[in-house]
Amino acid sequence: MNSSDHTELQPDAKVIIDSPGNCDVRMIRSLKTVCPQNEQEIARMVFQSPSVLLDALDTDKARQISTILNEAGAHTRIAAADEHIEQGTGEYELAIVVPDISRVGHIFQEILVMLQVKPMEAVRLMVQSPAVMVGKLSRAAANAFAGRLRKVGAEVDLSRYQEAAYDLFVSDPDLHDLNRLNEIFNRNGIRRKANGDAGWSKSSFALPGLNWSLVDRIRDELREFDGKVKLLNRDFSRFDISLKSRGDNPQAVMEVLRKQFGIPESVHQKIFKALPVVIAREVPFNRMQQHLDELTRAGAEADARLTSLQTFDLRIKKSGDTEKSMDILRLLGLDSIPLNRYRHKRAPFTIEGPFSPLQARWMQKDLRSVGNQADLIMR
């Protein structure tokens, strides 16, 4: 062996993962065989790529490992041992919205593969409101996961969560709750204006626009309120927009419906006759106010309802296959006690929630597929 061959085998290379690409969590498990780190640390490196997966390798070995990972769908490369790498940090969270309920099964299957979780855990993640799938992602990893989910029909929201604004909502607070909340707010320097409700949250006690440093200080204390208090990252907030009145200039309103909402002119008069009508669903926060302003300028009256605070019951008007219906309800979140309560009921009857918007729509779709007539009832 000559001197150049000997030099080739020196530990002078490292393997960089730039993005998980199309790989799933199984890659993390397989990397345990070649990486000295534990599974949790490997997951951090993948989810916060770019990262140095392996270093102190000879070039041939680094090239072999990089090639195998790239063939599996990851985006990796080799770099010189002394090359500086700007490594990623876990600054992003990712949430999904399912605009077309017929695609929910495809999205569900992609999440099963991507995150390698059990079906019940995938459902639990999806039916949260908002549906935050994974956090502490780098920008590269967030974009990779977002691309996969968009391909199967999901809309994806990304948030740099420490830079986001947060809105705090309290449902049905009693005097004790209000006193306790005010004590927490005062101690942390949070001042609530007398008319502190945002325009789209008048039905709830609300504190809009909190920053991360405040949220991080108070969130543990808010857990004592048994779900009455909800902190929402505004980057994940979605709204249903309702047209309540067309005003005195219907032509101007029709123009907004066509241009801003993509609603064809052929259905405008039907909408006007049926007011109030939801004309857009699951609109992101950063577009919601723009839509309301456009409608107001056209002379219409409209409002926006935050979907993350909506909950539903299901009304069964006609029963279908009982056992298949029970399987659907079990997968989508009902435990054994409510299931037994509904197993032998004769229609019509109500399956009591509260169910999140996606959970309710998903139940409705799948129950209809096995012969039930099911309607959603907002609580």
Image: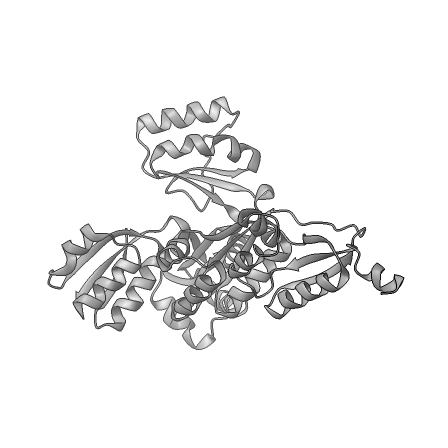
Q: In which quarter of the image is the N terminus?
A: bottom right
Q: Nearer the viewer, residue 287 or 325?
A: 325
Q: Position of residue 360 (x, y in %)?
A: 31, 59
- Residue 67 occupies which quadrant of the picture? bottom right
Q: Position of residue 211 (x, y in %)?
A: 56, 37
Is residue 328 something that shows in the picture? Answer: yes
Number of disc labels: 0
Left or right of 117 in this view: 311: left
Relative to 170, residue 352 above or below: below
Left or right of 296 in this view: 172: left
In the image, what residue occupies the spot 83% across and 60% down?
6
- Residue 72 occupies which quadrant of the picture? bottom right
Q: Which of 37 and 71 is in front in this view?
A: 37
In the image, what residue occupies the spot 56% across and 51% down?
43
Q: Nearer the viewer, residue 75 or 144?
A: 75
Q: Position of residue 83 (x, y in %)?
A: 80, 52
Relative to 169, residue 149 above or below: below
Relative to 158, residue 250 above or below: below
Left or right of 3 in this view: 66: left
Left or right of 245 in this view: 336: left
In the image, what residue occupies the spot 23% across and 72% down?
370
Relative to 339, residue 21 above or below: below
Q: Where is residue 159 in the image (x, y as percent from the top left)?
A: 57, 50
In this picture the colour scheme is one colour
Q: Nearer the viewer, residue 211 or 268?
A: 211
Is residue 260 something that shows in the picture? Answer: no
In the image, what residue occupies the spot 24% across and 59% down?
314
